[in-house]
Amino acid sequence: MNGSDKKKLQGILKKIDSIRKDVEELIGNESIKPSHKAETSGEAKNLIKSIGDLSVTDLEAKLNTFGHKELGEVFIGVGGSSGDKRKPKAWLIERILWLAKEFSASHKSIRES
């Protein structure tokens, strides 16, 4: 076996490996495609679940106790885009209040009229 034969065989092996990875991904092998999504903190999850029960002032007070990372998680949880989660805390709080309370209240009043 000469050098060009070895190069051909190595090329075939690379193609086989690539095809194997594609097939495993298609059949759902999660070890090939790991999830990079970070877990939402417990406090953020609890707040997202209880937003409907809180008044606007209580929600704003609770949001002011959160750190920037938790505010970003809540922002995404109420329908904000993940690209905006790194904006300033004041902006995040304002948008969370809008998305969680004022937006739905405005739509409700429009539907009722």
Image (cartoon, rainbow, N blue to C red):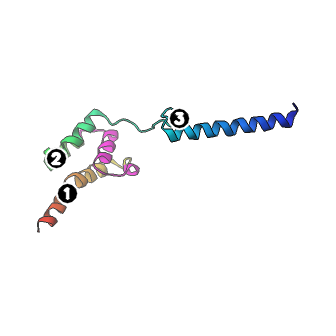
Mark 1 or 3: the one toward you: 3
Residue at left offset 50%, top offset 32% = 31
Say whether disc 1 or disc 3 marks the residue closer to the N-terminus: 3
| Residue at 57% from the left image edge and 41% from the top image edge | 22
Name the mark on residue 32: 3
Please tell me how crowded label 3 is: few (under 14), some (14-19), or many (20+) other residues with Cα within 10 Å.
few
In the rendered image, residue 62, in percent from the top left (x then y), is placed at 20, 41
Q: Nearer the viewer, residue 41 or 19?
A: 19
Amino acid tagged 1: Ser
Local SS, label 3: loop
On the picture, is 50 further left or further right than 73? left
Horizontal side of 4 relative to 56 (left or right) equals right
Q: Is residue 79 above or below residue 3?
A: below
Estimate the spatial distance between the alpha carbons at disc 2 and disc 1, rounded to whole Å. Answer: 10 Å
Three-letter code for the amino acid on which mark 2 is drawn = Gly
Tell me the distance, in whole angstroms, between the alpha carbons under discs 1 and 3.
Answer: 41 Å
Q: Nearer the viewer, residue 32 or 97?
A: 32
Residue bearing mark 1: 104
Question: What residue did someone put label 2 on?
Answer: 52
Residue extending furthest toward the right: 2
Q: Nearer the N terminus, badge 2 or badge 1? A: 2
Residues rendered magenta in the picture: 64-84
First of labels 3, 2 by sequence position: 3
Residue 40 % position (x, y): 33, 37
Residue at (16% x, 66% y) in the render: 110
Is residue 103 a member of the stretch shown in magenta? Answer: no
Is 82 placed left or right of 45 in the picture? right
Q: Quadrant of the C terminus?
A: bottom left
User: Is residue 78 inside the magenta stretch?
Assistant: yes
